[in-house]
Structure formats: C-alpha cells, structure tokens
Image (cartoon, rainbow, N blue to C red):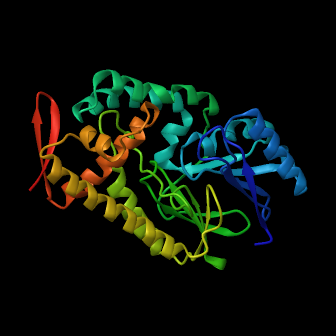
Amino acid sequence: MDDVYQLEIPTPFDVGRVNCYGFTQGGLTLIDPGPSTEQAYEELSAGLEAHGSTVADVDRILITHPHMDHFGLASRIVDESGARTVAHRDATKILTDPVAHFEQEQTFFRPFLQAMGVPEQTAQTAVGLPEAYTDYQEALAIDRELSDGDSIDIGVDLQTVPTPGHAPGSVCFIRETDAVAFTGDHVLADISPNPLLTLAPGTEDERTRSLPTYLDSLNRIRETPAEIGHAGHGPVISDLDSRVQEIIDHHQQRKERIANLIEEMGSPTAYDIMQEMFPDLPATETFPGMSEVIGHLDLLEDEDRVDIRERDGVRKYTID
C-alpha cells in the first residue's frame, strides 16, 4: 500500500499509541488523528512532514468511532487546514458535544450501576472518574454523516461497514482492491476490545446491549472481502478472519465461566460476579469491569439461560 502510511500517535491512556493512517491519493486523508494533546499534535505534524505534507494540507478526516484517543485532535486539524470531517451518523451526537454526552451517561449510569449491585459510593466514583479525560477531546462538527453501506471516494473507494459494539457509530473502512480493512478498535491484534456500556444512539434513558451488538458486528466484518486488518492500536492483523474467530471464542468461554459462577454463587448481582472474577480490580476500572460482566449476562439472557429478579431495587441472577 504505497499510497497509505501509518503514524503511531501518543495517547495519555493505558492502551498506548493510536494508529493514524494517511492516504495520499485524491488529496491527504487521515483516519483517526489521535487525542487532543500537544504531544500528539507535535508527533502528528512531524509524521506528516516526514511524508512531505503538513497539517494544513489535510483534506479529509475519517473517524472510526467516537473515543477521544481517536478523534480528539481532529478539531484542531480542521481549524488549521479546513479539512472536511466524516463519521457515522450514530457517532455524530457524541462527536459534536462530547461533554454533554458524558454528563448524560453519568446521569443514567449512576442509578443503573446501583441496580446492578454496585454500592452507591462506588457507583458515584465509577461514573465520575472519566471526567478528567474530557480534556483530551474537542467538539467536532461533522461535514458528512455516513449511513450503513456508504462508500467514500478519497482517490480510492472505501466501503463503510457499520460495526457498533465497542462504541456507537463504530465503522470499519474496507478497501476492496487489496482486501484491507481499517478496523479502528473493532478488531485489534493483541487485545479483545471491551464493548463498553453507553447510551443507545438518540436516547438519554436506554443503554446499549454492547456485547451482543459487538458479536453481531464481528460476524458482519467476516462477510466482507477483507483479509487483512489495519487496526487502531497495535500491529497489522495478517489473518482477519482468524482473529475475529479468536475474539468470538474468547467471549463464548467467558460467558460459560459466568454461567458457572452464577450456579456456584446462587443468586449473585452483576457486581458480585465482577468481584469474584476480578478480585483485585481497582475502583478506576469498575465501569469497564461491569461492562464486561453485564455484556456476558446479556448473552445468557438472550439464550434464555438466566432468570433476573429484583429485590429492594437490585437485580439478581439465577440460572434457569
């Protein structure tokens, strides 16, 4: 892919650097320029200059999903270059006002986590901790909202494949000419992405069923001609289909482990299960830990294998 290059942009997060991809046909197009930090801007600028361009030369910015380590820097690039922005329609509301979206999530998930057994103070901490991260993103106006199956002409056609689950509005961009997918965080080489709980697109009082949705999206990407994955973090995925199957197998195994735990524990809450599975999990990881457990409980519920009963406002699970 002589017309595409990869820049590894630093982030302040545990996941490490994010992969930004530059396309040089039909003007300069970037996929996922990174978070809004001075270090990210400086390294992106240096990377572009090494390939004969500057930030001012950017014509388009494509966003795979609305997480700040991927889109946070885009607004600054637009201000400098006048670049047009492209994202899936389900990501637009988050991108255009990420702080408001975060505040809506806080309002919804504080009582929701308590209903799942999380103590009140722990729930308060869990939904409040990400607030410090809002500094790494800036609101981003979207010029083109993608619908499912749209194509984008950037000098070569990229097909849009919707892949919600890890985040609302997640998309993969497929270049069919060489069977390559730019997967964002939907498929990673070394990590099984956590389908985080979030608000369902267009709502303020309904959560996503993130893991079932994510698994459906994994199967959708297998239906494309893509054989190789260029991910949002980490190395190239040389056999995309095999990696997808590994992730599916991982979640099926974890689902069965949780089913066994429910039988052993009697009638636990989701929080009880999380503590049993991850006994040393710090408070900072409560929300992703609960997302992990609730996602697998959703799978068991879809298979009619669990019974959910509410007592004193708290939900407990038993195996049918």
Can residue 275 be spotted in the picture? yes
| Foreground pick, 118 / 39 | 118
Residue 202 vs residue 32: left or right? left
User: Picture coordinates of residue 132 (x, y %)?
Assistant: 56, 26
User: Picture coordinates of residue 48 (x, y %)?
Assistant: 84, 51
The outermost residue toward the top is 121
> Is the residue 291 above or below the residue 188 in the image?
above
| Foreground pick, 39 / 173 | 39
User: Picture coordinates of residue 235 (x, y %)?
Assistant: 65, 63
Q: Residue at x 80, y 58 (%)?
A: 27
Can residue 200 be spotted in the picture? no
User: Picture coordinates of residue 218 (x, y %)?
Assistant: 43, 65
> Is the residue 302 above or below the residue 225 in the image?
above
Q: Residue at x 41, y 63 (%)?
A: 217
Q: Residue at x 16, y 46 (%)?
A: 265
Location of the C terminus (image quadrant): bottom left
Q: Residue at x 15, y 29 (%)?
A: 313
Residue 106 vs residue 158: left or right? left
Location of the N terminus (image quadrant): bottom right
Residue 193 vs residue 12: left or right? left
- Please tell me how many numbered marks the rendered image carries: 0
